[in-house]
Image: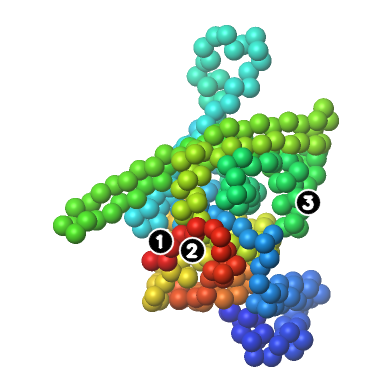
């Protein structure tokens, strides 16, 4: 199922695949969706990504995930794990009290309201990809016009107003800027002794945001944390913006795409990830593994469209990962230091 369209394109070519796939759609909307998958898959299989298509994400953030939806509490700490690696995201604070109230110690209730919460959802993931892509070139990253252009390139509207996307983008940018990301590894030496490595990083050291009097236009800059920036340049995983664009509104799809882009080219043999492992890694908000399995099955056709060379099978007990070509050919990412294969 996951490689259904890619396989047909290899066998029949574009036009015959479009004809066959269109016949599978029961409604006009379904046929349109299937044909879009064919066209995106064909483009990714036949055209190398250009310079503007090259995106990056830290390998640690490829292995774990942020919340998919708004956490119940802004003070809650978020933790996810993948094998010997753990990601802990601690929310930061912002003082939004009126100037007259800032000369006294805040009450417990006021302290709780100062927490901005951890980032969540698909927009937070897209902002992180934008920050790290630009961060491969410079520690100082422009928001506003460049972020808006990035989001538009993914087919997302950038609009103002109470329900517009600008408000959500600003909120997620602030959450990312104020959070502390703790990455923890556990290694075993030749004698069997365990060693734990803990790295606390702020992805963003400084943040400046401006908005117009009407609140419709905004801009800003961020400076990536020095430690995170250095680590990113050693552990960057290349992604294809065209694949990201296809998944831009689906946080689980983006997580699976990033996971596959990191894991699959590094494999020398098949690896089976059970649903329980994937739930701890990507779907901890879901109470039962069968719900995660259902959602993964639903999104896998679009993940396979975004990453046509991903050789992944959905089984009754999880995902079977097989060695695959990289989402971005190594030659395309030449000039950047990337995470080395295992």
- Looking at the rendered structure, the secondary structure element under dot 1 is helix
Decide: is 256 above or below 26: above
Residue that numbered label 3 is attached to: 157
Decide: is 255 above or below 327: above
Instruction: Tell me where residue 256 appears, x and y as whole percent.
Output: 54, 63
Instruction: Tell me where residue 43 appears, x and y as whole percent.
Output: 70, 74
Q: Residues within 10 Å of mark 2 (few under 14, many from 20)?
A: many
Residue at x-position 52% and y-position 65% = 261
Inter-mark Cα distance, 2 to 1? 17 Å
Inter-mark Cα distance, 3 to 2? 29 Å
Residue 72 occupies quadrant: top right
N-term mark: 1 or 3? 3
Which of pointers 2 and 1 indicates the residue nearer the eye?
2
Q: Is residue 30 visible?
A: no
Residue at x-position 73% and y-position 84% = 14
Q: Residues within 10 Å of mark 3 (few under 14, many from 20)?
A: some
Where residue 277 is drawn, which disc sits there?
A: 1
Residue that numbered label 2 is attached to: 262
Inter-mark Cα distance, 1 to 3? 35 Å
């Amino acid at each position: 199922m996951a490689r259904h369209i890619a396989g047909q394109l290899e066998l029949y070519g574009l036009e015959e695949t479009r004809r066959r796939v269109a016949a599978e759609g029961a409604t006009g909307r379904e046929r349109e969706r299937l044909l879009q998958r064919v066209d995106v898959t064909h483009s990714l299989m036949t055209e190398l990504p250009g310079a503007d298509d090259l995106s990056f994400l830290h390998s640690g953030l490829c292995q774990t995930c942020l919340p998919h939806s708004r956490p119940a509490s802004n003070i809650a700490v978020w933790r996810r794990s993948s094998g010997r690696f753990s990601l802990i995201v601690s929310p930061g604070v912002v003082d939004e009290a009126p100037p007259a109230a800032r000369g006294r110690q805040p009450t417990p209730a006021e302290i709780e309201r100062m927490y901005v919460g951890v980032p969540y959802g698909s927009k937070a993931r897209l902002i992180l990809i934008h920050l790290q892509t630009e961060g491969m070139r410079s520690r100082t990253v422009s928001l506003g016009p460049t972020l808006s252009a990035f989001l538009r390139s993914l087919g997302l509207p950038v609009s103002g107003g109470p329900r517009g996307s600008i408000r959500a983008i600003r909120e997620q940018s602030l959450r990312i800027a104020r959070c502390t990301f703790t990455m923890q590894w556990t290694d075993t030496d030749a004698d069997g002794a365990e060693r734990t490595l803990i790295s606390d990083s702020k992805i963003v050291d400084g943040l400046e945001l401006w908005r117009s009097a009407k609140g419709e236009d905004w801009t800003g800059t961020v400076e990536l944390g020095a430690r995170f920036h250095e680590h990113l340049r050693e552990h960057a995983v290349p992604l294809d913006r065209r694949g990201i664009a296809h998944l831009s509104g689906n946080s689980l799809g983006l997580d699976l795409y990033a996971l596959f882009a990191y894991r699959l080219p590094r494999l020398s043999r098949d690896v089976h990830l059970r649903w329980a492992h994937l739930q701890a890694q990507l779907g901890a908000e879901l109470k039962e593994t069968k719900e995660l399995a259902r959602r993964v099955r639903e999104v896998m056709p679009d993940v396979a469209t975004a990453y046509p060379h991903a050789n992944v099978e959905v089984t009754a007990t999880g995902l079977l990962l097989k060695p695959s070509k990289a989402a971005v050919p190594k030659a395309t990412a030449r000039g950047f230091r990337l995470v080395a294969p295992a």
